[in-house]
Image: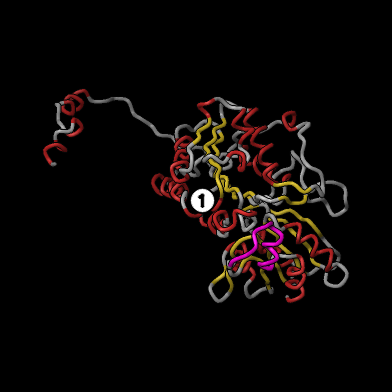
Amino acid sequence: DLDTVLANPMLVDDGGEATIEKVGYTDTQVTEARPAPGTSNLVLSADQLKGLDLPGVGESVSARNGTQLAYGTIASAFPDRFFTVSCDLDPSTKLDEARAAVDANHKFEMGIMEQASSLLANGIALSSSDRQFVVFATFAAFFEGIAREGFELWRYQRNLTGSNEGVNVAMHLSHVGSCTGRDHFSGWSLDWITLAMGYLPYLDRFYTPSDARSAFVAVRDMAANYGGHIIGVPRDNLPVLGKQDGSGPLWEADSAWEAMTTFRQYEGSKKAILAVGAPAFLAGEAAEACAGTDPVDVYVVSGLPLGDGALDGLVERYSGGLVTIEDGLIGHPGVGLRGFASLVQSVAAGRVPTAHVGIVDPTIAPSEGHLQTWAHFGITADALVEAVSSL
């Protein structure tokens, strides 16, 4: 009804506009750009990191345990600067300890409304340029299919203002990859790496932890650096990675985060495996199997970007070639590579041989546990050994 619409008070000219024009304004209003990505944010002190109970080498625990401890520690240290948005999944995404440490107006339970939740997290981050840590956590599969608008706001915000980079919010993608137990397809997140790579221009960092300790370091680093972040956290139990000489874990609570960490090195090696996330321990097993006949070094990739020249340096160093492994959809040359495999292939093509281990065809698979699922898709130590020998 047109008359009803036009009768709405918001559409009625009550003369107020003319009054405003007569008053005029002399003060200049300035909108300042937000801090640049990487600017110091919420940094845990050495004292706050002392005495934390992280699992030891070889212990099989979920990487989620590391994020749970990290979020809880950060929220306890900065309760007035920590905000969390949830979709009724805190026991699974492990934001429960952090929620318990903050007041009611710093934690928002949205139910199963992933798109609205991602936008709410962005809104909280945009409401202030002060130091704060805003986390929205849900299953990674829901980010792929429902909550993408939360990422698109990052793109829009950057293009709108130019000078404003990186909405200061962390999108926590839980249960990444195919290892989601009995939940099977409804929980699978096979495009999580490709998805995050598409938003790298708007990020400070994208994190791909491979065990509980690297997950702790990743979350600690997210909080310490201003800007947009994505973290992909595996669901299932994974062995805590240790140094090659047996001297201790690959990461400590206060370790500096690095995109790529040397995991195994052998004399005379001319080949290397680059392992992303959960399957990293398989790369260690494969390297041990190859050590006597076809030595191969192993690097654990804990996130992107790798840094200028990092991949070029590996290509120049390993003339025998590079192998990648990831728990995600990588495609094949016939349909095009995707995921981390595509990044390595784009740099190595025409220079050194490559081979890629990942999900080529996402067909029906067993879902009793991640190792059975990986075996179905050919994500195994044996497959890595074969890939190394095929270079």
- Residue 185 locus on image (x, y percent): 56, 58
- At x 53%, y 38%, the residue is 86
Kind of residue at badge 1: Phe
- At x 21%, y 23%, the residue is 23
- Is residue 214 highlighted in magenta? no
- Is residue 377 highlighted in magenta? yes
Q: Is residue 52 left or right of residue 40?
A: right
- Residue 110 locus on image (x, y percent): 48, 37
Q: Is residue 277 left or right of residue 250?
A: left
Secondary element at tag 1: helix
Q: Which residues are magenta?
A: 364-378
Relative height, residue 377 to residue 155 (above, below): below
Residue at numbered disc 1: 143
- Residue 103 locus on image (x, y percent): 55, 25
Seen from the viewer's position, the closer of residues 130 and 7 is 7
- At x 60%, y 36%, the residue is 40
Relative height, residue 133 to residue 281 (above, below): above
Q: Is residue 203 left or right of residue 265?
A: left
